Image (cartoon, rainbow, N blue to C red):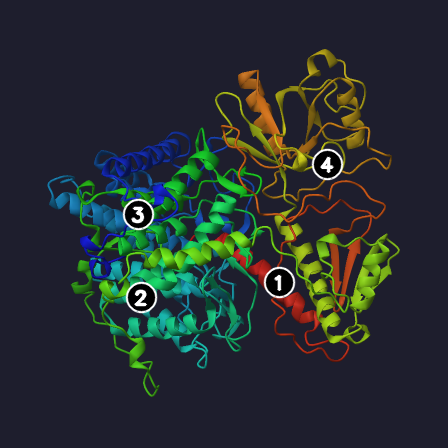
């Protein structure tokens, strides 16, 4: 939470004379009021649809207009650990209702929670998620209820939410029963962690943020109730993490063994897996007044700025070798960090990193879950995360620069244009195509609308002074008055820094003088301009001119074709040989000593890395899809279904407008013979069932009937692009040049949405395209792919990267396979300005270590799916 000490005086409001008139002028109060009212309308749309279609379920599924109940829907893995059958979204939204001045709705919601929610559920939940969302939500709701009671409303309230919070806290405590004090990652709400009935307690690892993001909620619970137990456990966990930091770099790893304290993953950054650990050190100092937390934060922060910060980038490093980058991409969770830097008072790097993030959002409409150092998509999902809006709000509070109001306006516009659906707001499955995921996480209501409302609100619009509260990582409001409240037992002061040389210059105890920060009113703009230019120049990415001894660009894994003689020669020069296996696949093996030079050996190692990364990505990301967008009433383009492409027919990536038409079901439904309803299919998009014949045969039959496109729907009931790998529909071994219409594939769940719409509305019009179009038909700029010229057949067969296998120093590749879709293998190799030495058969880096690196990438993705932060 930002405090008034970091605010600029009113007379330092910034006025910029930029090239854009709109961005150079202070936004009028009327304009801010319109945007504020728009935030309220959007919140009402999301909240009311949850209450109407999902409550008492934990979350809303906005595409199918129903609640997500754990156990009734297909498992999504660790991400479902946030769901505990405790009406998660309602509890997470309580203090949002209060802040947005919805007092009637807030009181009704409190009554519902008290009356309906039960915590004694035999269900295994994430300790981290339950703490920040549910315990934090109950404490934030209690804070708001107490405030309202003191102002004469809700006089009936008798601390019911606080009693529930303590009940929940007691249910989480068994997770802390470890020798280290670090909590188990999961706990059974009814049975704890011991015994077979708990179905948990066998885990050995947890993320740093999972163990280090407890102190605010547990300390608040102790101080509200007078029971010191909760705060003591949270402090013990933080003490242990501090003790286990790498003493030379003063950095912490991403994953730690909760029993031994050994670092399981030694990469360190400010994004997924670590982020809120740093945030809670700073905020624990603010809320609790313990100088030790600030000392620890400042020690870590100095190392972050020394090793991880490469303005405007924030790149992970190894804790033992902090000058060695751990990866060349960034995840979206680090978008919170500029806001934390504002709280720290370090405005310049906050402005720079935020501007970089903003330029990425302008290219892709939203922040992709991960993006490369040249700002291309690495992981394409966007689950409506609020971190970028959070940092935008804090920077506006610190600078009063109207530029950040315009940034906030763009966030609103993108949410309405691309994520809004009839039953709420849907997460983006792929920011490149605009396809949706049937998901609206509780943090969207808990955080996004708080920060956007505060961004556009005037002081008189707020029902209370937010400067009297601190925001948790879930944006729940805890009163700063807790700093003077007793927890009935002062925690022992443990000087974990005794005997260490500390540089007191790192430990600023006051915020900087803003007049000195901004002697020139154009200062923030001057910081942004070079970053904007750098991001703009990265799209399209300039071609590098470096090849293994040949003066040409290195061969990229996604371009490799196994029977292209030129590609095979490039592999030979890089020390990579190709072995044909009996099952039709090929296997790649690298021997660095067989490369023509050390530089070529390095390129070969990187090629092998890319091939394994491409395989891992395509198995996880399951090929960038095409989009089926329902454009007719009442959808109006707001529902976008994830579709797989075909290797034949019209290439939608080369069509500026896509193919638009009404849908109808083919007869026969399998499309394996001439259609009996050709007069109806003519001029329409035919719906077909998968199976019984080749895809190309179906396409020829509907094309003969006069269809303008086709959609094949999976016949495997329950299949979904959320859980099953997308693929490209292959031809039938014959020349398919005669197929000129587009054919797309929908899994059963997505296809059923289309069929149900057709059943209810009779006439349903869709747009088949490579990405969703705005409702007015405008196409957004797309810099997520380098080229889209890979769908046409050549004499060389493409490699199926989804079939890559690896054994020690080998990478196997399927030869009879689907065409890889460009943009998926967007791994960007490390800048080769500093060339690693290559010696021996294994070079400077073994395949085992490469495999470990890519395994860490996959674990990082899983961690991001678990982390709501």
Residue 341 appears left or right of 620: left
Give the structural element (helix, strand or loop) at label 3. Answer: loop
Q: In the displayed structure, does residue 694 sit left or right of residue 368? A: right
Mark number for residue 615?
none
**Which residue is the site of mark 3?**
402
Q: Quadrant of the N terminus?
A: bottom left
Could one spot residue 176 in this view of the protein? yes
Q: CA distance from mark 1 to mark 2?
A: 32 Å
Q: Is residue 332 visible?
A: no
In the rendered image, residue 775, in percent from the top left (x then y), is placed at 49, 29
Label 3 or label 2, whichever lies nearer to me, is: 3
Q: CA distance from mark 4 to mark 2?
A: 52 Å
Q: CA distance from mark 1 to mark 4?
A: 30 Å
The reply to whether the C-beta atoms of the residues labelled 3 and 4 are less than 8 Å apart is no
**Helix, strand or loop for disc 4:** loop
Horizontal side of residue 49 vs 761, given as left or right:
left
Q: Reading the chain from its start, which is encountered first: label 4 or label 2?
A: 2
Mark toward the start of the polypeptide (3 vs 1): 3
Q: Nearer the viewer, mark 3 or mark 4?
A: 3
Q: Are dots 1 and 2 in contact, CB under 8 Å?
A: no
Q: Which residue is more in the foreground, 193 or 847?
A: 847
Q: Earlier in the sequence, mark 1 or mark 4?
A: 4
Mark 1 Cα-neighbour bin, 10 Å: few <14, some 14–19, many ≥20: some
Q: Pointer 1: what residue? A: 855
Mark whose residue sits in front, 4 or 2: 4
Is disc 1 placed on a helix, strand or loop?
A: helix
Separation (CA) of disc 3 from disc 2: 27 Å
Above or below, 93 relative to 215: above
Q: Which residue is mark 2?
A: 282
Report which residue position mark 4 lands on.
646
- Relative to 795, say whether 485 is above or below: below
| In the foreground, 283 or 684 | 684
């Amino acid at each position: 939470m930002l405090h008034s000490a970091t605010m600029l005086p009113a007379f330092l409001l910034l006025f910029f004379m930029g090239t854009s008139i709109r961005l150079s002028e202070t936004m009028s109060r009327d304009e801010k009021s319109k945007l504020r009212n728009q935030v309220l309308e959007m919140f009402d749309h999301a909240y009311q649809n949850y209450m109407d279609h999902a409550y008492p379920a934990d979350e809303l599924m906005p595409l199918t207009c129903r609640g997500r109940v754990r156990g009734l829907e297909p498992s999504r893995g660790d991400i479902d650990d946030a769901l505990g059958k405790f009406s998660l979204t309602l509890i997470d939204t309580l203090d949002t209702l209060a802040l947005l001045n919805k007092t009637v709705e807030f009181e009704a919601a409190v009554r519902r929670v008290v009356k309906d929610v039960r915590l004694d559920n035999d269900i295994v939940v994430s300790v981290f998620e339950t703490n920040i969302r549910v315990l934090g939500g109950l404490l934030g709701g209690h804070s708001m209820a107490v405030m309202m009671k003191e102002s004469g409303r809700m006089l009936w309230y008798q601390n019911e939410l606080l009693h529930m919070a303590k009940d929940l806290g007691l249910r989480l405590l068994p997770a802390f029963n470890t020798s280290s004090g670090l909590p188990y990652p999961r706990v059974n709400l009814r049975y704890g962690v011991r015994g077979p009935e708990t179905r948990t307690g066998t885990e050995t690892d947890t993320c740093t943020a999972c163990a280090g993001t407890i102190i605010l909620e547990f300390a608040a619970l102790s101080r509200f109730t007078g029971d010191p137990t909760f705060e003591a456990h949270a402090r013990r966990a933080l003490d242990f993490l501090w003790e286990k930091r790498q003493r030379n770099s003063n950095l912490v790893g991403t994953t730690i063994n909760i029993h031994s304290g050994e670092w399981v993953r030694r990469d360190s950054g400010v994004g997924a897996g670590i982020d809120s650990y740093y945030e809670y050190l700073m905020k624990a100092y603010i809320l609790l007044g313990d100088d030790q937390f600030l000392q620890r934060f400042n020690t870590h922060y100095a190392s972050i700025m020394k090793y991880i910060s490469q303005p405007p980038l924030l790149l992970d490093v190894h804790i033992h070798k902090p000058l060695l980058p751990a990866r060349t991409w960034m995840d979206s969770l680090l978008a919170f960090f500029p806001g934390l830097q504002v709280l720290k008072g370090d405005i310049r790097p906050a402005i720079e990193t935020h501007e970089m993030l903003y330029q990425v959002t302008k290219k892709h409409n939203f922040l992709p879950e991960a993006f490369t150092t040249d700002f291309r998509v690495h992981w394409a999902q966007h689950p409506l995360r609020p971190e970028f809006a959070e940092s935008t709000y804090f920077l506006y509070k610190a600078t009063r620069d109207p530029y950040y109001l315009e940034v906030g306006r763009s966030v609103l516009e993108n949410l309405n244009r691309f994520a809004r659906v009839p039953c709420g707001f849907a997460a983006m499955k792929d920011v490149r195509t605009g396809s949706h995921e049937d998901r609206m996480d509780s943090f969207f209501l808990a955080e996004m609308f708080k920060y956007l409302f505060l961004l556009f609100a005037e002081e008189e619009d707020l029902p209370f002074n937010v400067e009297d509260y601190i925001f948790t990582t879930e944006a729940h409001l805890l009163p700063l008055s807790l700093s003077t409240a007793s927890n009935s037992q002062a925690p022992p002061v443990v000087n974990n820094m005794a005997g260490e040389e500390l540089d007191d210059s790192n430990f600023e105890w006051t915020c900087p003088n803003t007049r000195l920060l901004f002697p020139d009113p154009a200062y923030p703009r001057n910081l942004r301009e070079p970053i904007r230019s750098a991001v703009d120049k990265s799209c399209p990415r300039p071609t590098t001119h470096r090849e293994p001894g040949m003066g040409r660009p290195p061969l990229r894994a996604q371009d490799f074709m196994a029977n292209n003689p030129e590609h095979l020669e490039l592999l030979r020069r890089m020390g990579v040989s190709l072995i044909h296996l009996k099952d039709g696949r090929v296997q790649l093996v690298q021997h660095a000593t067989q490369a023509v030079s050390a530089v070529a050996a390095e390129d070969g190692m990187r090629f092998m890395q890319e091939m394994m990364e491409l395989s891992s990505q395509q198995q996880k990301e399951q090929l960038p899809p095409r989009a089926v967008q329902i454009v007719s009433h009442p959808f109006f383009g707001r529902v976008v279904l994830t579709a797989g492409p075909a290797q034949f027919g019209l290439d939608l990536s080369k069509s500026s407008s896509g193919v638009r038409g009404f849908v109808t079901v083919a007869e026969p439904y399998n499309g394996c013979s001439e259609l009996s309803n050709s007069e109806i299919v003519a001029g329409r998009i035919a719906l077909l069932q998968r199976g019984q014949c080749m895809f190309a045969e179906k396409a020829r039959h509907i094309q003969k009937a006069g269809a303008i496109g086709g959609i094949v729907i999976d016949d495997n009931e329950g299949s979904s692009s959320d859980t099953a790998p997308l693929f490209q529909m292959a031809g039938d071994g014959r020349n398919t040049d005669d197929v000129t219409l587009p054919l797309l594939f929908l899994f059963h769940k997505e296809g059923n949405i289309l069929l149900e719409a057709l059943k209810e509305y009779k006439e349903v019009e869709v747009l088949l395209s490579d990405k969703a179009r705005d409702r007015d038909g405008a196409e957004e700029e797309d810099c997520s792919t380098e080229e889209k010229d890979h769908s046409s057949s050549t004499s060389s067969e493409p490699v199926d990267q989804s079939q890559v296998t690896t054994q020690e120093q080998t990478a196997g590749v399927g030869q009879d396979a689907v065409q890889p879709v460009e943009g998926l293998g967007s791994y960007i190799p490390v800048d080769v300005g500093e060339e690693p030495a290559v010696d021996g058969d294994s070079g400077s880096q073994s395949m085992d270590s490469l495999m470990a690196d890519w395994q860490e990438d996959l674990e990082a993705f899983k961690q991001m799916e678990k982390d709501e932060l």
